[in-house]
Image (cartoon, grey):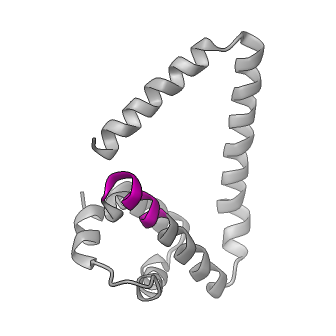
Amino acid sequence: MSLEDLNKKIEKEHQEYLASLSPAERAKYLKEEQDFEGAVNQFWNEKYPKMRLEEKKKYWLAGTHKGMRTQGEAFGDEYSEFSKKWYDFAKKHEPDFDEIFDYVTKNLGFEFDWKEYNKRIKK
């Protein structure tokens, strides 16, 4: 199953779950979802820009390591977390992303396949 197919399946199941809730439960769930999205936006718009370069490097290193490990276990493809959409998001929030990601790839603890990565982020 491709990542796109999995996302479609998750969205369908999410909609089915929402339809199964009572109006009060649905309202509570949607409020919690909105609060979470607000916290994510607050992180990227307020907290992340104030981080020092070393903190940003640690943030991206931890996230990349965890993401690649999780994708590898789930799909057998460590590089499936990378996409043009992911890369555009990263560049939007971190103008020096390429410099930081170079550091990340040198500190993952394994050899990073730049060819595979570049193939994914250009789609």
Which quadrant would residue 47 be assigned to in this image? bottom right
Which quadrant would residue 23 be assigned to in this image? top right
**Is residue 75 one of those drawn in magenta?**
yes
- Is residue 98 positioned above or below 34 on the image? below
Which quadrant would residue 117 be assigned to in this image? bottom left
- Count up the numbered dots: 0
In this view, the residue in front, 103 or 87, is 103
In this view, the residue in front, 49 or 26, is 26
Q: Identify the residue at horizontal 48%, vertical 25% (top origin).
A: 13
Q: Residue furthest front?
A: 73
In this view, the residue in front, 113 or 51, is 113
Q: Identify the residue at horizontal 74%, vertical 35% (top origin).
A: 32
- Is residue 15 positioned above or below 95 on the image? above
- Is residue 16 positioned above or below 79 on the image? above
Report the side of 70 relative to 52 (left or right).
Answer: left
Image coords of residue 2 (percent x, y): 28, 44
Secondary structure mostly seen in the magenta stretch: helix
Report the side of 40 relative to 118 (left or right).
Answer: right
Q: Identify the residue at horizontal 66%, vertical 81% (top origin).
A: 55
- The N terminus is located in which quarter? top left
Numbered range of the magenta stretch: 67-76
- The C terminus is located in which quarter? bottom left
Image coords of residue 28 (percent x, y): 77, 25
Image coords of residue 73 (percent x, y): 40, 58
- Is residue 53 positioned above or below 80 on the image? below
**Is residue 35 one of those drawn in magenta?**
no
Q: Identify the residue at horizontal 44%, vertical 24% (top origin).
A: 12
